[in-house]
Image: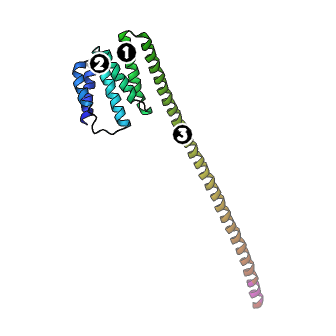
Amino acid sequence: MQLTCLSTVAENYLEAKEYEIALPFLRKSFNVEGLKTGSELDDYIAFLSNDFAQAFIGLNMPDSAEFYLRKALFHSTSPESMDLRLRAYQQFHLLFDKTGQKDSVLKYFQLATMLRDSMFGIEKTKAVQALRFGEELRQSEREEELRKAEEQRRHSIEYGLIVGTLGVTLLVSLNTIGDKLVFWFTKVGNNLN
């Protein structure tokens, strides 16, 4: 937590172009003890290295800036840290533009552009996949609704057939009982005469 606060204070000074004031806060926040190893540590080091490079570019110290930018690139190799890599490329572009190294300016401009396009392509792909997944989900929901409606219709027809069959059976039974009653009353009436 304290490291995050220190780096945030440093970033505020970097934004205000107070590079000399930002450096002590960056140095204090570079204490990486207690951080997990692996990707989290690499991302933190890459992030701070980019901040150091920004300060050294602002202080017109190109060698120190280049050292920290190379460090940032070294620690930003995971796919999740492409934004840190992009920032390093953009700062390399700025650094070499300030020092007049036109070939390197072009190289890092191209790298930054390619990475930004790649990130945009990945975002687009994720968005398309999310849309496709949403559409597939809606389609499966529609199919489920149709299946349920068809099942409900089938049940209604079955219930109708059952009720109709019972009705016909009841009518036939009543008709048979009625015939037997007529026969019985006729027989009883004949016996009385």
> In this picture, is 178 found above or below 138?
below
Drawn side of residue 36 relative to residue 171, left or right: left
Q: Amino acid at mark 3?
A: Phe
Q: Residues within 10 Å of mark 1 (few under 14, many from 20)?
A: some
Q: Amino acid at mark 2?
A: Phe
Q: Amino acid at mark 1?
A: Leu
Tell me the quarter of the image containing the C terminus.
Answer: bottom right
Q: Earlier in the sequence, mark 1 or mark 2?
A: 2
Would you name the residue on which mark 1 appears?
94
In 3D space, how far apart are the residues under numbered discs 1 and 3 (Cα atoms)? 41 Å
Towards the viewer: 84 or 179? 84
Would you name the residue on which mark 3 appears?
133
How far across and down, in percent of the image, does residue 181 sit? Answer: 72, 81
Can residue 88 be seen here? The reply is yes
Q: Which residues are magenta?
A: 184-190
Name which residue lies at 38% across and 9% down: 100
